[in-house]
Amino acid sequence: MTMTTETLVYRNPLLSAADVADWIAEGPVQAADAEGAVELRSAGGPDDHFTFWCPEEFGDRIRVSWDFSPTSEPGLAMLFFGASSVAGGGIFEDGLAPRDGAYPQYHSGDIRTLHVSYFRRRWEDERAFHTCNLRKSPGFHLVAQGADPLPPVVDARGTFYRIDLVKDGADVRFAIDGLPLFAWTDDETTGPRATSGRIGFRQMAPLVARYRNLEVHALS
């Protein structure tokens, strides 16, 4: 049996807005201090969503984990990971189409990425049946789905939940508070797989949520 070794390569306590001062915003992100966490919300209107990119790039085999607490809904929370340009470079290279937080720019544009939505409360049908969705871009491919155990804000009452995402090459696993929710292997029938690249938080307005204790481990 092969043992996997994990090495911490990035840690951000997310204790205050100062901890995300070097993050890259696409769309109207408002970051605020929130009792030992960073609270994120849209600074725009009800359809002004955003993506907030970590300034680091990571390899093809990583574990990403963070604490998440929804404080006002409706809305939606998501993580992009393994994000790079379709041409193989970085997502901020010259020549790529501008991005301002509008979702089609990410799911059907010129970047290759995976993204998991794990607090899907934006639309009525999402609130009626809670799921966590894994999609692959470009192409908006729904490649995996699992149950969403997160309660509504009224019942969460400020609780932080530990989100855990593993991208081990072609294999993806997702869990919340240690509960496995889905596992998927990319066989590339939907196009070339995402490899190394960026991670970024995305929220759909008007969600307000708090984040803390972000860690990225390299797997070997």
Image (spheres, rainbow, N blue to C red):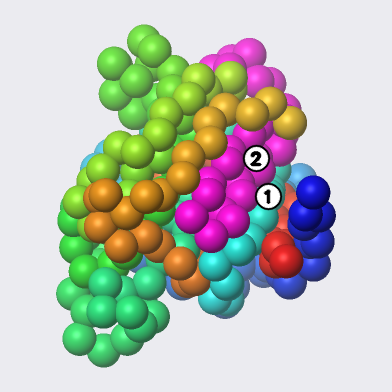
Q: Residue 53: give x, y in percent of width and height.
A: 48, 66
Q: Residue at x 48, y 25 (%)?
A: 146
Whether the magenta-drawn stretch holds residue 32 is answered as: no
94 displayed left or right of 5: left
| Classed neighbour count for the residue bearing mark 2: other residues with Cα under 10 Å, few (<14), some (14–19), many (≥20) | some
Q: Residue 46: give x, y in percent of width and height.
A: 28, 39
Q: Are marks 1 and 2 in contact (CB under 8 Å)?
A: yes
Whether the magenta-drawn stretch holds residue 161 is answered as: yes
Give the quadrant of residue 15. bottom right
Residue tagged by mark 1? 65
Q: Residue 188: give x, y in percent of width and height.
A: 32, 54
Under circle 1, the secondary element is strand
Residue tagged by mark 2? 163
| Amino acid at circle 1 | Ser
Q: CA distance from mark 1 to mark 2?
A: 5 Å
Q: Residue at x 68, y 49 (%)?
A: 65
198 displayed left or right of 149: left
Q: Residue at x 53, y 36 (%)?
A: 183
Magenta segment range? 151-177
Q: Residue 207: give x, y in percent of width and height.
A: 44, 36
Under circle 2, the secondary element is strand
Residue 191 appearing in the image:
yes
